[in-house]
Image: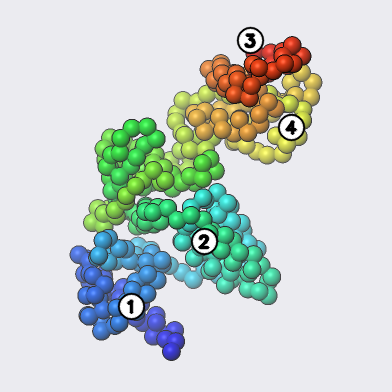
Amino acid sequence: MRTPEATRRERLERIALLLQRNPDGLREVEIAQTLNFERRTVNNYLRELEAQGYVYREGALWFSLPHQGMVLRRLELRPEEAMTLYLAVRLFVKQHDKRNEAAEHLLMRLAEILTSDVGLQEDILAAARELAQRPTVPGYENVFRTVMQGYINRRKVEIVYTPYQGKPFTTVVSPYLIEPSAIGFATYVIGHSSIVNALRTFKLERITHARLLLQEEYQVPRDFPGLELLRSAWSIFYGEQLTRVALRFHPDVARRVQETQWHSSQELSWDEDKPGYLLLSLQVADTTDLKPWIRTWGANCEVLEPADLRDEMVGEARRLAHLYGWHTSTDRQHDHSRFKDIFGE
């Protein structure tokens, strides 16, 4: 028999209030005994409260998350507003290579808003099903949820981090900013790190364990620039010192390059020495995350500045030529002038 909606909401509230009165946490069985509920029922309600961001589990204990400073209001959207939110989540789905139940839940909520009368409900449900088919990475869902809860509730998060190069280490992070990146299907948290007592950036996919420190609050410093911090970044690598990058694009892709505002600092002009070629200049803090984008254009993009970036691309081009067997080509003389134009001597 289905539980009436009013009864369900009342039970959810009773569980939430019970956890609020027990800041040291309660076990599932303790909640069931205190409220005289079936344990399976308690588990279902706890999972629902967890999905809504009201409670948090650590080991066998359940805790209440602070919501005193947050008022959750009913979200009422016009169809075009809901579609805008859907497109944002859809982009998240395309850029996310792992299952994420929080995004699945949001898509289901959007499907409720955009009913079948609007004709878009099935598209949104299909996006949710697509995300559900992504591989489940052990621990990632908990890391994602924990970092988000720390950011939302201004609570510090203890993490175990495994850098790309180096040994794993433990640090306490105060999340100031959460930023997705299209490069590598990644999400980053930027904030204060206790181990260096300075601002650092951590890739969520490299966090192997995260624990919310419910009793340790933090304040975002007044001088923290927020998203302005990333203004000079191509994607996620920021800094105060800027580097000028100059690129030359082949006429075959010139129109495509013109169609998009790639960076706030970009300047476009036609190359006077090579008719039809388009020049693009940028001012970025770091070229680390710019290089993958340059590579996507292949031989249609030539790095002119800075010299060290050009040398790096030339080196890569030489290795590619070797990889694909150019050095064994029987038609080497015919290709030699072309090779010089692209790769240099």
**Residue corresponding to mark 2:** 132
N-terminal-most mark, 4 or 3: 4
Any part of residue 81 in sight: no
Q: Is residue 102 above or below residue 220?
A: below
N-terminal-most mark, 1 or 2: 1
Query: Marks 1 and 2, how far apart in space?
Result: 24 Å
N-terminal-most mark, 2 or 3: 2
Query: Where is residue 195 shown, x and y percent of the image?
Result: 26, 37
Q: Secondary structure at mark 1?
A: helix
**Point 64% across, 16% down: residue:** 327
Q: Mark 1–mark 2 contact, CB under 8 Å?
A: no
Query: Marks 4 and 3, how far apart in space?
Result: 25 Å
**Residue corresponding to mark 1:** 40
Q: Is residue 241 above or below residue 68?
A: above
N-terminal-most mark, 4 or 1: 1
**Residue corresponding to mark 4:** 253
**Residue corresponding to mark 3:** 345
